[in-house]
Image (cartoon, helix red, strand yellow):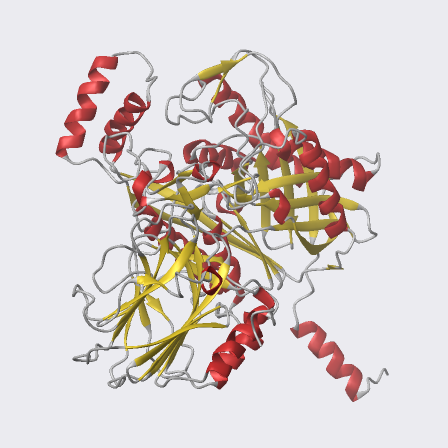
Amino acid sequence: MIRFSCSLVTLLFLALQSPALAEFKAGSAITDVTPKTLPVLVNGSMVSRSVDKVKTPVSARSLAFTDEKETIVLVVVDSCMVPRDLCDKAKGLAAAKADIKPENILISATHTHTAPSCMGALGTDADPAYVLFLTKKLVDAILTPLKEMKPAQIGWGEIDAGEYTALRRWVIHPDHVQEDPFGNPTVRANMHAGRDREISVGKTGPEDPMLSLISIQSTDGEPIGLLSNFSMHYYGDRDISADYFGLFSNGLQDRIAQGKEGFVAMMSHGCSGDIWRQDYEKSTERDPDSTIENFSEGMIDLGMSAYESIQYHRPESIAMMETRMTLDYRTPDKQLLQWSQKIVEELGENLPKTKEEIYAREQVILHEKQNTEIVVQALRLGEKISITTTPNETYAITGLKIKGASPTEHTMVIELANGGDGYIPPPEQHLIGGYNTWAARSAGLEVTAEPKIVETSLAMLEDLTGKGRMNTAQEHGPAAEYTLSLNPTAYWRLDEFTGPRALDSSGNGLDALFEPQTLFYLQGPHHSAFSKGEKNRAVHVADARISARIPDLTDRNYTISMWFWSGSAPGKIDKTEWLFSRGRNFADRNSGDHVGLIDSADGKRYLVYEGKGFLRNPIGDPGRPESLFPVERWKWHHLAVAREGDTSHIFLDGVHLIAQTKNTAEEGHPDTFFFGGPCTNKDFFEGRLDEIAVFDRAISSDKIKQIYKKAAGASPEVK
């Protein structure tokens, strides 16, 4: 007779009741999708072109995962864009041949502008022969990695690759607003406007500098696959080419595999709709020594650094979700449609050649379509790693929104996945115009497309993980903590991803309001001083103000503290750009206090102060040049105004510039404060604002200087 101890019986019972740990397996494959018949149409340009030479092969690289319950396949294909109907057809054909759900297949494009066209865009149509060829090849790319899947483990790596990516979309000065293809002066921002420093003001948003890696290896340490993701639009190559995406993938493959077969590296496209490789803030000249080869080699070096530090684990489970949603197109009104139809009729069977013809044809197409279905996916690989997708050319800030709020520790956002539905600027970016906003198949979705896609992605991640999204507010650094220690009435960090509210960090609940043309999440001043472990964030105001009512501030004693970054080119401020104003909305500046910037005849930029009883002159004594304190372009400065009765004290970068007493009594005490423009609602400041605090008293000169010193450190002017 066999007797079991109580503890052994308990263990056996628990083992029978608990599900067996699933075995995580993975496989990889490369499928050649280089056209066999040339010439072939190539899209990525305004007008149609065909190419009859191959510089580098173009490929579809794929990874497959299974936990014995769910199977997931990811394909990254060297193409500018792949339309949803082509993706759906390939997924359906593959699913019919293998035990996999179509919604568990992800197909994304690298966005090389030198690949055969499988989708019509602007002046280029799809190449019909290549569409058939690519569809069959994508089926192979989905099925092949399923054939030899091995027990595997997974790891995450990332590294800052900021020197290889930059904002290409810049704000244009209001004196140089440009016309859109329909003859309207709407272009307040555009791609590559930063090349001309006379007309440009600053970047329209943030970069995402992180090169992210998901590495898969066998349980005995042999590499299986590597999925990379980076936000850089493309380098630019010639003939048929995989661009830097292919060079990077092949280079990592060679270094990691060292001649062994069976390992596949791939580069997916991060959120790059407003991104390119040159930082116009640093230089407007092309680097003559920069080539696609040395760009790729530098990226490979960074990729290897991140790869070598990866720690691996075996995920207990994987899961994937898909949401299909119908979004409207921004269709033309009756007048624009009639204009467009007339141009298209005159074109006849000819392809459009001019910008006017191209966008006229696009209006007719959008009118006929009215709306479209888009696909958004999310997947989880274990507990720590997730991926979300957009079928769009997505701005970097959109990817940062998803990553920042994601409930998983690591999140990758792949754009141009499962479709090619054009640019989706955040709503505020539509208001400043530019190529990325002109209604076309390449940028035609409704204005609210971006927030809808962000919300859908985060909701799916919450469902997949069973966890809520993260708080994206930045932690306070020492300079922010010092400001809070002075008990401000309101303190706006301006680190929001979107409006309309600027949240009050003081605890008093006095949120400010962003006006519509405010741009978010740009780099702010003194990162480590204001934010712990991350970049400090700021807003850019383009014909917009930040406004707040401070209802209990009824006397004439108060202080404002703020940081500003002036964007206008030298000599552009021939009338004052107002930084700060206390007054009644749409009233004149007869009461309250107003501080702005002006360019003088000597080519320098100075603060000016205006209020009832004051002359509007540069702050300081014009007879003593050393008393004038110039403001530098594209540099963060600290401004403080301390009002004590009839006397106003003005400080710039910790220096007490003036103490002026009004010579007439002021009537009334407006309770509305404006930043980035005056109460008159004209003559706006052009640039960035950050870290704005309002105090219900005139704080001391020493404390104002300390606010500056805590952020910028002591300087010769600060005692």
Picture coordinates of residue 614, whole percent (x, y): 26, 69
User: Furthest-right residue in view?
Assistant: 1
> Which residue is at 63% across, 46% downward?
163
In depth, the one of 115 and 353 nearer the eye is 353
Residue 154 is left or right of residue 48, and the answer is right
Residue 235: quarter of image? top right
The vertical placement of 86 against 49, above or below, is: below
Residue 545 is left or right of residue 243, and the answer is left
Quarter of the image with the C terminus in it: bottom right
In depth, the one of 662 and 709 nearer the eye is 662
Quarter of the image with the N terminus in it: bottom right
Picture coordinates of residue 426, whole percent (x, y): 37, 51
The vertical placement of 634 against 489, above or below, is: above
Picture coordinates of residue 493, whole percent (x, y): 44, 70
> Which residue is at 60% across, 21% downward?
34
Tally of marks: 0
Residue 495: quarter of image? bottom left
> Which residue is at 53% across, 58% downward?
403
- Does residue 41 show up? yes
User: Furthest-bottom residue in view?
Assistant: 6
> Which residue is at 42% across, 54% downward?
605
In depth, the one of 257 and 696 nearer the eye is 696
In depth, the one of 259 and 321 nearer the eye is 259
- Does residue 151 show up? no
Picture coordinates of residue 561, whole percent (x, y): 42, 73
